[in-house]
Amino acid sequence: MAGAYDFVPAIAALPLLAFVVSLFFGQYLPRRGAEAGIVATAGSLVLSMWTALTVAGVTGSATTYNENLYTWVAGLADSAVTLRLGVLVDPLTALMLLIVSLISLLVHVFSLGYMNDEGETGLPRYYAGLGLFTASMLGFVFANNLLMAFMFFELVGLCSYLLIGFWFRDAGPPSAAKKAFLVTRFGDYFFLIGVVGVFATFGTGLFAPIEGAETLHSFPELAEEAIASGASEAGVQTFFGLGPEAWFTVLGLLVLGGVVGKSAQFPLHTWLPDAMEGPTPVSALIHAATMVAAGVYLVARMYGFYLLSPTALAIIALVGGFTALFAATMGVVKQELKQVLAYSTISQYGYMMLALGAGGYTAAVFHLTTHAVFKALLFLGAGSVIIAMHHEENMWTMGGLRERMPVTYYTFLSGSLALAGIVPFAGFWSKDEVLYEALIHGLGSEGSIGTLLLAGYAMGLLAVFFTAFYTFRMVFLTFHGKPRTDTARDPEPVRWNVKLPLAVLGIGAATVGFINMVPVKKVTGAEIDYLHKWLAHGGIELTTSEHYGELLHDVAHIEQAELGPLAPGAVSLLLALAGVGAAWTLYNVPEPEEHTDRLGGVKTLLMHNYYQDEYQVWLAQGVTVQLARAADKFDQGVVDGVVNGISSVSLFVGSRFRRIQSGVVVNYATLMTLSLVLLLLAFVVAGGVL
Amino acid sequence: MAIVTQYYLVLSAAVFCIGVYGILTRSNALMFLMSVELLLNAANINLVAFSFYYGNLTGQVFTLFTMALAAAEVAVGIGIILVLYRNFEDIDVTKAATMRW
């Protein structure tokens, strides 16, 4: 009998079908292709649920699945690399499939209100883009090897380009789309080298071993063996004379390049705020479930490999902690609703990276889950506000929307409480666990790694205050006080197709955190850390969080300090409350002022995003363009010069020489005769007759 | 008594030189054609002379072939001359000098 696993490829194939239908037949459908997308993503959601239930052991016996389905390039020689496409389903995959298909379905429904009801043109293209986006992300999630993951990773980047630049007639979106494409491509370049490096080193890109008549080993497994018993023992080829550990660090950091680009980590975060030029449902999809999540998911997927390199872990943690703080400070001064959310996205993904770097695998996946829910909620809520405000995004033109759009307000509040990390909303539990993991591993480890983890923890902790502050500044400016413009006094009403996704996600943002209440478990002893249990089980032992815990201890030598969860939790909660309180006193008044003006030069710095764009543009124009120009000179002058010189010499000689061809037959005859005579004379002289 | 072979060869060389001279100095296409015939026949004389000298018939048979070839060549050559006349209203080979670079 066909089980759930046989239908896993269909989870991605359904949205792909919707892409085709929307693109070619969307204009003949009453809703311009939305039907196809909604049906397909709903189907994906049902299949994902079935898969998750099977992984949980409810509807089937095999709790994991890992098969190669298609051989793409078959290696002929014994040691040749074979490139395959396959499916890997384990608890992490099942969870992510659920998140992606759920958010995608809600975004499709929301788009009915945001795009169709607003009378946008080009809707088939829009829904086709959404379908392809969803399909590529789902394909990325269940990819069972690094190359397949890379292919879908690139597809996700392409779709983000198409969707951010949806309103291509305006000036902003095409430029933002180009920027998103180029900046992420810069990171993907390193990822590509990393993929090639992994294949060259291990001869395989499998994330998890495939058991069978002949067991196919995975690359994290081989790497583990190489570190334990030496590279040649494990059949692993290292390069540049580096030992296995150093070489694996290099590989890990190369792949991390793609992660940093896609997950908008410092210094490649600059594309994400600009990506707000796209339609708001697309922003929700990009930032909650698909593109940005892809980077963090990739690290989680090959976590067994990263655990072998403490250096890479420390770098991940430091980049994550720094990004969390760095982006949070920029969010404080922004005036547009979506800009604040954009910087909060960067900041929250920083937390996930911090957790991954600190060995908190479950914490990172937990934060990925809760963030997907509450950030999708916040973006859709912002979309609802933008509909109401006739596409005006500046918060200073809003105010007092609380009474006029209660559904949006309360759901948005739920998301904001989750983002700010106020107990008991989802964000509190996950952010708290992230910080807790960073702290105990930072305290427990010796040497520079412990210091780096603690530095990451300190930055993450400080970011909690800023997060709470900018979140509630946004809430108060948008919904509280007196309306500051006529549009805010009489906002456009929104329909069910906006309210329904908001309600679903609003409830989710309040409750998703309950799947993993670790502090409560530690205090009461109740076994309610469901996510920990979920990730710790599974038929593929090498991708369970239990195995990761062992690796963390044995290979990376990152130890845990004995520390209760209550004190760190209380500290981060207090900081969050302080942030909310500060926002309350400054902005929860009928006529709020721009208090950020008092920051003076700091505000200018923050408004310009620490001049990150400027220095990157300088890097591009001042350095890269000059370098390219010099290379062009060399190419045009030296390389082409030699070729052109040779050809011009032969052209010149030819043009002189052809003059002997006069067209007069008599001349030819004369030449022939004279030549013959000369030849004869030559023979005679050479032959010694005379 | 037979004539010695050297005389034939001298005759052949003389005919050949007359042919070459004709080709180099004349501009009339018909003269050209005739000069080419002279060259061919100089070669034929040689073939026959040597064939006779060695008592071997191959050279003489070969000459028959050359004569047939010469007849065909003359047919083609006169055809070309006719076309030449049509295009240039003249059969002066130095005037038809457009088939070049």
Image (tube, coloured by chain):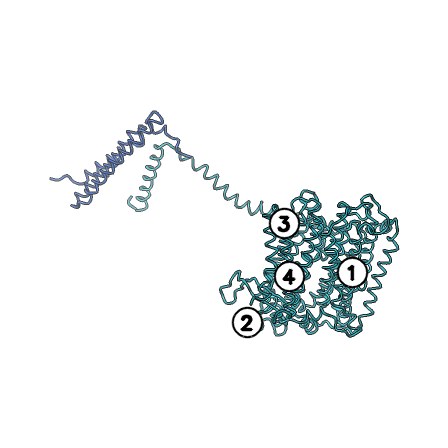
Q: Which residue is mark 4?
A: A46
- Callout 1: few (<14), some (14-19), or many (20+) C-alpha neighbours within 10 Å? many
Foreground mark, 2 or 3, reads 3
- Quadrant of the frame with the N terminus of chain A: bottom right
- Quadrant of the frame with the C terminus of chain A: top left
Reading the chain from its start, which is encountered first: label 1 or label 4? 4
Residues behind callouts 4 and 3 on a single chain: yes
- In front: A466, or A682? A466
The residue tagged with tag 2: helix, strand or loop? loop
Q: Residue at x 16, y 43 (%)?
A: B52
Reading the chain from its start, which is encountered first: label 2 or label 1? 2
Q: Colour of chain B?
A: blue
Question: Disc 1 to disc 4, how far (Cα)?
Answer: 27 Å
Reading the chain from its start, which is encountered first: label 2 or label 4? 4
The picture places residue A135, in percent across and down from the top left corner, at 62, 56
The picture places residue A485, in percent across and down from the top left corner, at 83, 44
The residue tagged with tag 3: helix, strand or loop? loop
Q: Which chain is cyan?
A: A
Task: Read off the chain for label 3.
Answer: A
Q: Which residue is mark 1?
A: A418
User: Taking A260 as reference, is A74 left or right?
Assistant: left
Residues behind callouts 3 and 1 on a single chain: yes
